[in-house]
Image (cartoon, grey):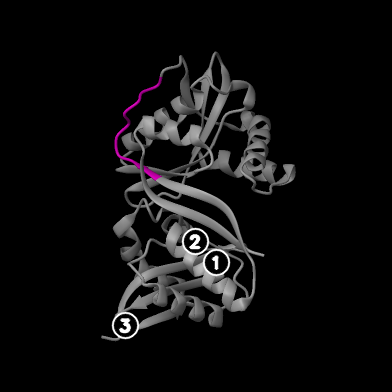
Amino acid sequence: MVCLIKLEKYDDLTLFKKDVISFLEQFEAENNLILGVLLSISENESPLLMATVIKDNEIGLVLLQTHPRQIILSKSVTYTSNEINIIGEKLSNTMQEIPGLIGEKKLTTDLAMYISKLKGIEVGFVMDQKIYKLEKVVKKTNTNGILRRVVENDHHIIKEWLYQFCFETNQSMSLEEADKKAKLMINTGNLVAWVVDGRMVSMAYATRPTQNNITISYVYTPIIERKKGYASDCVSAFSQSLLDLGYKTTSLYTDISNPTSNKIYIQIGYEAILDSVVILFK
């Protein structure tokens, strides 16, 4: 039996959403990045790439690029090595330049290795990640603090924290960019802080809401306040507040090389559901 693999590119955002959202929603937390980004795109925006991989006349993989450095890959159906190579060939023929990929570890790595051979370009592994999902908070807060929404008066602190967060996670962000990002995040109303004795000691941000899931990101505690349980309490209280709003699950990405944060999230009640990887082509 011959298996047919096709790569279908889209120019129409509305049609793309119509075709792929139900596929992505089968695994909402695993697809929190691609689904959340897709749902946030307005009709007057034009993503750099919208595509599906069709296997035996059914969608098996969704690709979306809105960021200049990487294409997001959805959770996929199972592909053989040969099928992954075919996807790599079709993607290489479709795109003059493939900057990078982020997605489920094995598929993304195998695809990247084949593309690197095909195009004669070097693969750079940026970060090994895990995606976690929470349905119920297990560990309640321990410290004598409160969760509150971050407001405009906190801007100068948040700007610095964002800058430090990006520095520690190897993401390039200037102080000027951190200043703008802080303003945007505060204005959404989705940025919170854990406050102890009147001072902010940790922060977290809710982003990419989907029908049943919302993602927590930018979890940061300044060095001077670490090892006191503040990040754990901030994420625990924030996760509970998001569940109380009606979300069935919350999700987050972690850097596997940071065992402390991974341990914290598991204790709160987060369950690892997918290994992910960020790859850039050099």
Q: Which residue is drawn at 49% across and 48% down?
A: 129
Disc 1 to disc 3: CB gap under 8 Å: no
Give residue 178's quadrant in the image: top right
Q: Residue at x 51, y 35 (%)?
A: 204
Secondary structure of residue under mark 3: loop
Helix, strand or loop for the magenta stretch, by majority:
loop
Q: Residue at x 64, y 67 (%)?
A: 122
Residue 3 is tagged as: 3
Give residue 133's quadrant in the image: top left
* Residue 272 visible, this angle: yes
Which mark is in front, 2 or 3? 3
Secondary structure of residue under mark 1: loop
Position of residue 163 measured from the top left corner of the image (x, y, whole percent): 67, 39
Label 3 Cα crowd, 10 Å radius (few <14 / some 14-19 / many 20+): few
Q: Earlier in the sequence, mark 2 or mark 3?
A: 3
Write down the residue under mark 2.
41
| Label 1 – label 3 distance at C-alpha | 35 Å
Position of residue 189 measured from the top left corner of the image (x, y, whole percent): 50, 38
In-image side of 7 versus 98 (left or right): left
Secondary structure of residue under mark 2: loop
Disc 2 to disc 1: CB gap under 8 Å: yes
* Residue 43 visible, this angle: no
What range of the chain is rendered magenta?
132-141
Write down the residue under mark 1.
45
Position of residue 118 measured from the top left corner of the image (x, y, whole percent): 57, 78
The amino acid pointed to by label 2 is Ile
Q: Earlier in the sequence, mark 1 or mark 3?
A: 3
Compare residues 29 and 156 and report the one nearer the observer: 29
| Label 2 – label 1 distance at C-alpha | 6 Å
The amino acid pointed to by label 1 is Glu
